[in-house]
Image (cartoon, rainbow, N blue to C red):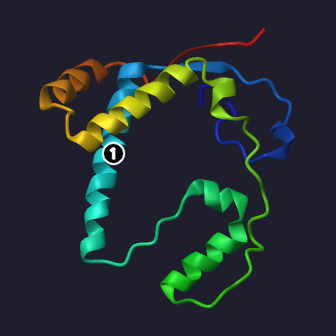
Amino acid sequence: RTTGVAHSWNPSWRGSHTARIRVNRILFARYVAGVLDTLAELDKLRVTNDVLDIAYEDLSQDLDREYRRILSFLGLPYLPVTWLDSKKVLPPPAEYIANYEEIASLQGKIRDAHARGTISQSWRKAVGLYCRGHSLVTAPFHRN
């Protein structure tokens, strides 16, 4: 919402000006930890359920192949994907997130700590308290 074109699928966007945004590190850390918690809970479903992993990157590279996998997993007949012919046109995140390298590094550190089980409850509480009243995306600034 801040840039006005986030997640744009509209080809008319190409070449439009995008405001660069800065992502709040602490809120991002809380978001990443929450996502990892959710993924860990979902992973437990593998014990009692058949699970199909679907990666956005795979869908964006070969939509037809991935839909074949999905339909096969569900036991449904193949239908060509004729209803979706658009491509995402937003530039890579590093181009519009001003502190992209910083938060990408932070994401890796949190992922590693989560895998080791070393994210403490006191860290979660402190981050939770900070997050009240703060926004994930802070004031954008424009490219020159």
In the rendered image, residue 135, in percent from the top left (x then y), is placed at 42, 22
Question: Mark 1 = which residue?
Answer: 36
In the rendered image, residue 31, in percent from the top left (x then y), is placed at 37, 35
In this view, 31 is above or below 66: above
- In percent of the image, x 69 and y 26: which residue is there? 95
- In percent of the image, x 73 and y 74: which residue is there? 81
Please state if 101 lies on the left or on the right of 65 as rendered: left
- In percent of the image, x 60 and y 24: which residue is there? 97
In this view, 36 is above or below 138: below
Please identify the quadrant where the C terminus is shown: top right
Please identify the quadrant where the N terminus is shown: top right
Bin the neighbour count of mark 1 within 10 Å (Cα to Cα): few under 14, some 14-19, many 20 and up. Answer: some
- In percent of the image, x 19 and y 25: which residue is there? 123
In the rendered image, residue 103, in percent from the top left (x then y), is placed at 48, 25
In this view, 6 is above or below 37: above
Secondary element type, mark 1: helix
Residue flagged by tag 1: what amino acid is it? Leu
| Furthest residue toward top | 144
In the rendered image, residue 28, in percent from the top left (x then y), is placed at 41, 28
Task: Return the residue nearer the eye: 61 or 144.
Answer: 61
Task: Return the residue nearer the eye: 116 or 10.
Answer: 116
Task: Tell how many labels.
Answer: 1
| Residue 112: quadrant of the picture | top left
